[in-house]
Image (spheres, rainbow, N blue to C red):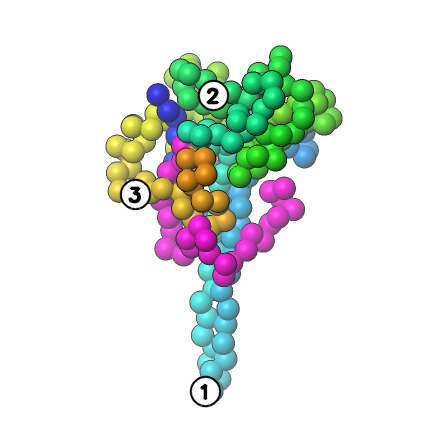
Amino acid sequence: MAYTFYFDASRCTGCKTCQTACKDYYDLPLDIDYRRVYDYEGGSWEVKEDGTVSQDAYAYHLSISCNHCEKPACTAVCPTTAMHKDPETGLVLVDGTKCIGCGYCRMACPYDAPRIDRSEKMQSRKCDGCYERTIAGKQTICVEACPLRALDFGPYEEIHEKYGDKAKAPNYAPMPDMTVTIPNLLVHPCPSMKPVDDTTGKVVNLKEVR
């Protein structure tokens, strides 16, 4: 079984309630977020000869956590096997009894999901798909908190069946090429979303997501 996140960019307003709810539930330190909301913007404007202005500006949001990839880069580089893929749920988890806080997992992850807690445990921390809630049949905190219902989470087959053609592969900027790790994430794009190799826009809230 593989669990997957579903993100509907046409609903997301960038309110960051998902991020805040997760941070509160797990009582995370100030510098650690398991879920982050990227604000991606681009476009330009032009003054025409008649004095009117035309523009092609755009902006959208992308809520991202660990994608519990099919080929997780973090587990491949972990020297102690602390970062591992749970055989029952497919979720990528951290074994706190093995993690030495080396940071290789964060350096390898193209989504920058693992975070190294230097203030307390000196270990890697990240989204675990609300593992305890998931195995108890409950929904993740971020999904429950989203006021616009832009997020969902569940077994891949159920999510794909539920959303059908709306559920697309996550090939949108500012995400990396999905073929690198094959993330368990499905995205319903909004009209302004750009392809993964887009160079016309940029993340405008880097200080928030790093």
- The answer to whether residue 126 shows anywhere in this view is no
Q: Which mark is residue 166?
A: 3
At label 1, the amino acid type is Asp
The location of residue 57, given as percent across then percent down, is 47, 64
What residue is at 51 percent from the left and 53 percent from the top?
A: 40
What residue is at 40 percent from the left and 42 percent from the top?
A: 170
Q: Is residue 195 magenta?
A: yes
What residue is at 44 percent from the left and 50 percent from the top?
A: 196
Location of mark 2 (residue) = 85
Q: Which residues are magenta?
A: 184-210
Tell me if 157 is positioned left or right of 59 in this view.
left
**Picture layout, residue 194 above or below residue 116:** below
Secondary structure, mark 3, is: helix
At label 3, the amino acid type is Lys
The location of residue 26, given as percent across then percent down, is 59, 24
* Mark 2 or 1, nearer chain start: 1
